[in-house]
Image (spheres, helix red, strand yellow):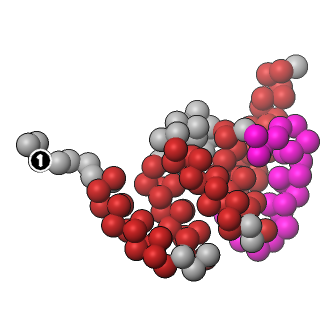
Amino acid sequence: MEEQKAFLIQALTRKARAMAHVEPAGDGFDQALTHLTRWVNIEANNDHAVLSLEKKKRMGHWGLALKLLNALLKNNDEDTKKSIYPMTKEEILAERTKVLHKLEYGHFMKREEGWKSVTSMKDFVLF
């Protein structure tokens, strides 16, 4: 029974994610999310952080979206690694920049862009 529930949750998660991309302003995402929330709490479970972030952005709750992204960054993107749709640190930083732009926090956006070059370095010179 638990295995079937896990498969159903995974299918509903994939459906909600697909609807988010297919219908940027449609209600298909909301319906899929409603079905998913019958089985799992997406707000308490960081495995569904991508869907929770999309929900907050669609509702215009930019402050809550920023709070979620900051929490994901605090844990060094470890929360989303085991999820169906993992987010890398670079993706989280890019989403945070978009949210800061929506909130019109220009000074934080400049700071974010400055730190992006430092935190996202792949190779560096040894001292």
Q: Which residue is mark 1?
A: 125
Q: Residues within 10 Å of mark 1 (few under 14, many from 20)?
A: few
Quadrant of res 22? bottom right
- Judging depth in this view, the residue of 26 and 76 nearest the camera is 76
Pinpoint residue 94: horizontal percent, then vertical percent: 48, 63
Question: What residue sits 46% from the left and 76% below the top?
Answer: 107
Classify the position of the C terminus by image quarter: top left
Q: Is residue 105 above or below residue 116?
A: below
Magenta stretch containing residue 56, yes or no?
A: no
Q: Is residue 22 left or right of residue 122?
A: right
Query: Does residue 73 appear in the picture of this structure?
Result: yes
Q: Is residue 54 left or right of residue 69?
A: right
Question: What residue sits 27% from the left and 52% below the top?
Answer: 121
Secondary structure under the numbered disc 1 in the rendered image:
loop
Classify the position of the N terminus by image quarter: top right
Q: Which residues are magenta?
A: 21-44
**What's the amino acid at mark 1?**
Val
- Judging depth in this view, the residue of 98 and 50 nearest the camera is 98
Q: Is residue 110 above or below residue 115?
A: below
Query: Does residue 86 appear in the picture of this structure?
Result: no
Q: Is residue 107 above or below residue 94?
A: below
Q: Is residue 95 left or right of residue 115?
A: right
